[in-house]
Image (cartoon, grey):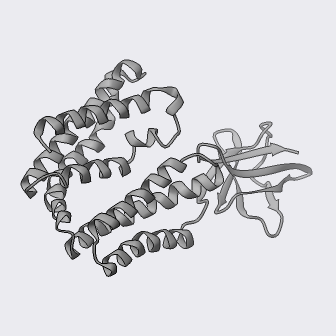
């Protein structure tokens, strides 16, 4: 890949990414992820590395690709962002990755050898893509069809890298196992919910420190009373979604509420308390 081609490639990807971040229709979609997460940029880096003749050329061209594309993405967003030039505060993350691309692309060039070195170099990449495919795929299952393109894109990368760079059947088997095992581990070890937060009681009841909170025996969440300023709140600790009733007893007064822990359409955990 020539230097002019690298420059044009960087500019085109930057314009596309900025468009995905600016145009409202792309908000909270697989396309917006291109400006936030790494999966697309791994693919772009592999394209550059595999079209270079030497490892140093690979390192220099990949580094320059990121050095042009990433700040250009933020520059294009400035007129459309409420932060103005302040949006560049988020460039720090990508600048660090830009610096890292130099040594990574230098050694990454050896994937062109298509041997066990390729397997070694691609192993963390395949594990990362397996994680991302699982993360996006599980979100798609809960909020179909959101993020389905991102999930399929990661799966596509895994299959293409294995098909192109792993010629031996044993290498292909390992290549399939790495993302599959990563996803399987995540399925069995990652809780769906892991939240600890305080939520004010609706209606602003005046509750004394002697008040007691009670809930059903097999409640999915642990509840306790706390006070934030002059307001009474419930500390909620949950590791799953659900709905349950609970009661706050304060002397002769009794208040009954319903707690709901759920995931909204953007994938954020929400905790809601309503008075019965």
**Side of 210 relative to 27 (left or right):** right
**Can you say whether 86 is above or below 130 in the image?**
above
- Left or right: residue 103 compared with residue 39: left
The part of the image, by quadrant, that contains residue 53 is bottom left
Q: Classify the position of the C terminus by image quarter.
A: top right
Residue extending farthest bottom: 170
- Residue drawn 79% across and 57% down? 213
Image quadrant containing the N terminus? top left
Asked where in the image residue 217 lies, by quadrant, the reply is: bottom right
The picture places residue 120, in percent across and down from the top left corner, at 25, 72
Q: Is residue 96 above or below residue 111?
A: above
Please tell me which residue is depicted at 79% across the width and 69% down the height of the picture: 218
Relative placement, left or right, of 184 versus 163 is: right
Q: In the rendered image of this protein, does residue 214 appear above or below residue 259?
A: below
Quarter of image, res 211: bottom right
Residue extending farthest right: 252
Measuring from the top left, give residue 250's x and y in whole percent. 84, 52
Total residue callouts:
0
Residue 59 pos. (x, y %): 13, 52
| Residue 158 location (% of width, % of height) | 39, 62
């Amino acid at each position: 890949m020539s230097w002019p081609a690298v420059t044009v490639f960087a500019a085109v990807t930057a314009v596309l990414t900025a468009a995905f971040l600016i145009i409202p229709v792309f908000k909270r979609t697989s396309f917006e992820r291109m400006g936030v997460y790494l999966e697309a940029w791994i693919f772009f880096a592999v394209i550059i590395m595999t079209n270079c003749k030497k490892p140093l050329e690979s390192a220099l061209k990949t580094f320059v690709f990121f050095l042009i594309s990433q700040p250009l993405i933020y520059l294009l967003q400035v007129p459309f962002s409420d932060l103005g030039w302040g949006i560049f505060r988020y460039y720090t993350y990508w600048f660090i990755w830009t610096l890292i691309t130099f040594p990574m692309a230098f050694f990454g060039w050896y994937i062109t050898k298509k041997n066990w070195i390729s397997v070694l170099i691609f192993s963390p990449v395949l594990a990362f893509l397996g994680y991302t495919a699982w993360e996006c795929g599980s979100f798609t299952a809960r909020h179909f069809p959101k993020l389905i393109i991102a999930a399929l894109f990661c799966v596509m990368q895994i299959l293409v890298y294995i098909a192109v760079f792993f010629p031996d059947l044993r290498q292909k088997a390992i290549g399939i196992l790495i993302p599959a095992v990563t996803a399987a581990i995540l399925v069995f070890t990652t809780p769906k919910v892991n939240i600890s937060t305080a939520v004010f009681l609706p209606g602003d009841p005046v509750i004394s420190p002697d008040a007691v909170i009670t809930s059903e025996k097999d409640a999915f969440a642990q509840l306790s009373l706390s006070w934030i300023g002059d307001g009474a709140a419930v500390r909620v600790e949950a590791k799953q979604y659900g709905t349950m009733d609970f009661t706050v007893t304060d002397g002769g007064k009794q208040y009954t509420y319903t707690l709901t822990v759920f995931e909204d359409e953007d994938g954020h955990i929400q905790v809601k308390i309503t008075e019965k």
